[in-house]
Amino acid sequence: MNAAASIRRIDGLLRGTVTTIGWRELAVWTLVAGAVHGAVLGSHAGRVGQALVSASKLPLLLAVSTGLCLPSFTVLHLLSGLRDDLPQALRATLGAQTVFACALLSLSPLIAFVYLSGVGYAGATLVNGLAFALATAAARVAMIRAYRDLERRSPRHRTLRRIWTVLFVFVSIQAAWVLRPFLGDPSLPVQFLRAEAWSNAYVDATRSLLRALGWLA
Amino acid sequence: MRELLTLVDRALRGRFTDPERLRSEGVVLSAPLAARAALLLGGIYGACMGLYGATRAEDPAIAQLIASTVKTPLLFLITLVVTVPSLYVASALARSPLDFASTLKLLMVGVLIDLAMLASLGPITAFFTLSTDSYPFLVLLNVAFFAAGGLVGLAVLRRAVDAMFAPQAPVIGPPLPPGTNDPNARRRRIAERVFWTWTVVYGVVGAQTGWILRPFIGAPGLPFTWFRERDSNVLEAVLHTLGNLFA
């Protein structure tokens, strides 16, 4: 892969002018950008171990969430009579993830700068939350752009895009919960998964909310 | 295996429910092959559902995995066998152009699509099953996925029923005077009635079959059994639960 040409194609992907990047190239960019950002994300308080762990977990999070949602996305395309558009739709969804990873990568120097200025654990969590929110917004813009041509051909693509978004967010929140910690509390030892990893993000969040409201002991 | 996947692919692409083909040739489908495809797809989802019982911390039971793999496709096929005579009579009374075999095959297409949707959601079920310890969450997730599969299957059947009762040739002529019964509107009403009869009969029998065949997930704290005691019916259980909710 010619690096300069590949960077130009990713530039086109960000601008919404290039929609024909190959699967492998998109996957490589997503995994590499995700890993680099993961390493920066985990390097808070100079913890090399956590940086290595997070570098491997961020690409894993994207790959697992995509893999789990692909079968139903394919079946829905067959059912909607949009089988012929499936490769383009998949490229659009994968492209959105590449944009997500690249947006995170672009924010990595900022995150490193914030870490180096001595921000605490709570501040680091907030900054990373903001970075994820910004990258998600960038991915959404890219997805809508990439789907413009598909939606012009059939309005059913808009429904499928929305179903993909809901399903992907639903699965990736749980995947991120299971794969936590990404940042790592400096007072705890570095670990790949938390001991209590195998729990449910939605149930735990609801429980915390009910407890905060005083409706649950 | 390849021919099973081809069959599922054709069903999903609407080859068996194409309006033109439905009217001219009926449903061109091998029923035994469709039953095998249903066993495969239902088995995939059943295995994902049964993982909970097989991997739970207390008293894990591999038998739950096997039981759910076998019982999920059976749930759909038993319901079909029990309801198909009455569904056929209901549609024949409404002058459906499909004979018994074609009606059965059309309903099998609906079941196949429902199961294909479920099987495609199987990896997500398995992921949540393996990563969560909350039994009520899993019950709700499975109910949501079964509802999604059912809705997709029903949408396809709805189109097929509309096509069956659609006029054979476009009516050419002056518009009907007001007050005259429009034959197309009458056909649409009949199609709607047939579709809802099918939906209600299959839905109610399906719910009861599911109740008889339970457990599918395996509640924590209860030992594994192939079937629970047949002490009530699903409607009674729902009313009982509602009663408890507001008690």
Image (cartoon, coloured by chain):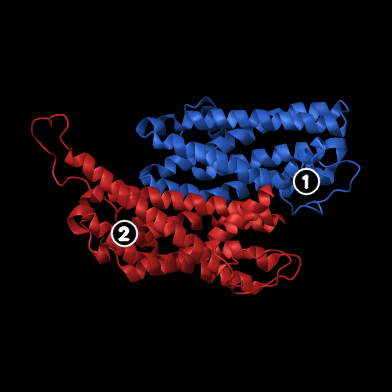
Point out residue B200 in the picture as x, y percentages from the top left corner. Answer: 41, 54
Residue farthest toward the right in the current orientation of the protein:
A187
**Dot 2: what SS?**
helix
Q: Which chain is blue?
A: A
> Which is more toward the observer, A132 or B32?
B32
A159 horizontally vs B103: left or right: right
Residue position for label 2: B106
At horizontal 38% and vertical 59% (from top left) the residue drawn is: B8
Colour red belongs to chain: B
Residue lying farthest to the left in this orientation: B173
Q: Is residue B195 visible?
A: yes
* Separation (CA) of disc 1 from disc 2: 55 Å
Front-most of residues A60 and B224: B224
Amino acid type at mark 1: Leu
Circle 1 SS class? helix
Q: Nearer the viewer, mark 1 or mark 2?
A: 2
Q: Residues within 10 Å of mark 1 (few under 14, many from 20)?
A: some
Q: Residues within 10 Å of mark 2 (few under 14, many from 20)?
A: many
Chain letter behind tag 2: B
Q: Report x, y in % for residue B116.
A: 45, 57
Q: Which residue is mark 1?
A: A52
For the N terminus of chain A, the quadrant is top right
Residue B113 seen in render: no
Split into 4 quadrants, where in the image is the C terminus of chain A? top right
The residue marked by circle 1 belongs to what chain?
A
Q: Amino acid at mark 2?
A: Leu
Q: Position of residue A61 (x, y in %)?
A: 66, 46
Residue drawn where x is 20% and y is 56% of the image: B97
